Image: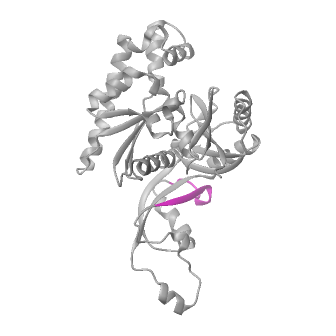
Amino acid sequence: MAKTILGVDIGHDQLKLALVRGGHVLKTASAPMPENLLRDGHITSRESMAELLRSTMKEYGIRANRAAFVLPSETVFLKNITMPLMTVEQLEYNLPFEFNDYITGELKDYVFDYAVISNPEAPNPAEAKSEGTAEAEAETEPPETTMELMAVGTTREVLEDAQVVTRKSGLRLAITAPAVSAYIALLRARRAELGVASEEYAILDLGYKEIRMYMFKGDRHVATRVLEIGMSSLDGVLEEAFGVDMHLAHTYLMTNYENCHHREECMAAYENIAVELMRALNFYRFSNPSSALSDMWFCGGGAVIQPLAETIGEMLNIQLHSADELVIDGEKIEECNSYVQAIGITMG
């Protein structure tokens, strides 16, 4: 019997929760994030974050024992690597050296993990035993081959943030993984449902501080393009247009106050965002000449701004879909696009 688990996605603008059982969403909840509680992906007060999580669960009547936590993208290193087949112990020793270009400070301040993403001929490294007699090893020696991994690194502090916040909220942390893992879980489920062997996908996260474009081939994460411009830039447009403060401007944006989504100033801002995305997409296609990418799913807080999505789809000349298509009965979940990461992380 499938167990219930609570997906936790902490964003700069909103805390998003999704209670999930067997891939089916039972309940969603959100709460505004206090200013500066999340800074550059780091929780500035574990106690305050835990209190926000507890109070949101109480307000929405959410009861859960287990939690799956989305690691903030700014705090995670991702790298696809190919390595010789080796034991778990050997892999744990060698993996940190793959991140030499990312690490600053002491190696002991970081944690690393991996997922096998391809090479069906190679056994899972967890099954590659280093024990046994010489005769048994000779009989079961695997062919010379390699394994392809998605390697992940983050700081111990970030991992401890997740552990402490969930524990103080009365939850047991069962899963911690980056947003990419949440998307891969949803894409795998879609591929299995449609019986598709392999496809190329893109997911566009219209976030508050930045926009991220994730590229996938099958369940393999290929690349991420980051635009350091997000929905907060639209707050600035409306702040000036209406002569209000930033907080009220954000409320106007998210509620489409006086049809502000279609204001001339906003439409010009959408085009600027779409141009930057077009440049990022063209660079990806240039770097991947065999790419046949034609479909993109959008999610995140900015997904509620329909003219933004339409502008992006037209300027990128790509078929844009709502990411609720990736979620079981997603069309029945209110503002499902905002909860995609919280839902997907529970399926890892």
Would residue 227 be counted in the magenta stretch?
A: no
> Where residue 274 sits in the image (x, y, percent)?
32, 28
> Where residue 254 sits in the image (x, y, percent)?
51, 19
Horizontal relation, residue 322 to residue 338: left or right: left
Would residue 112 be counted in the magenta stretch?
A: yes
Image vertical order of residue 144 relative to residue 341, above or below: below
In-front residue for pair 207/94: 207
Image vertical order of residue 164 relative to residue 317, above or below: below
Most extreme residue toward the bottom is 135
> Where residue 65 sits in the image (x, y, percent)?
73, 45
Question: Total number of numbered labels?
Answer: 0
Q: Which residues are magenta?
A: 103-116
Image vertical order of residue 82 relative to residue 86, above or below: above
Q: Which colouring convention does the figure follow? A: one colour
Horizontal relation, residue 331 to residue 145: left or right: right
| Residue 72 image-quadrant placement | top right
| Residue 277 image-quadrant placement | top left
> Where residue 256 sits in the image (x, y, percent)?
48, 14
Tell me which residue sits at (73%, 34%) in the image: 54
In-front residue for pair 5/110: 5
In-front residue for pair 310/279: 310
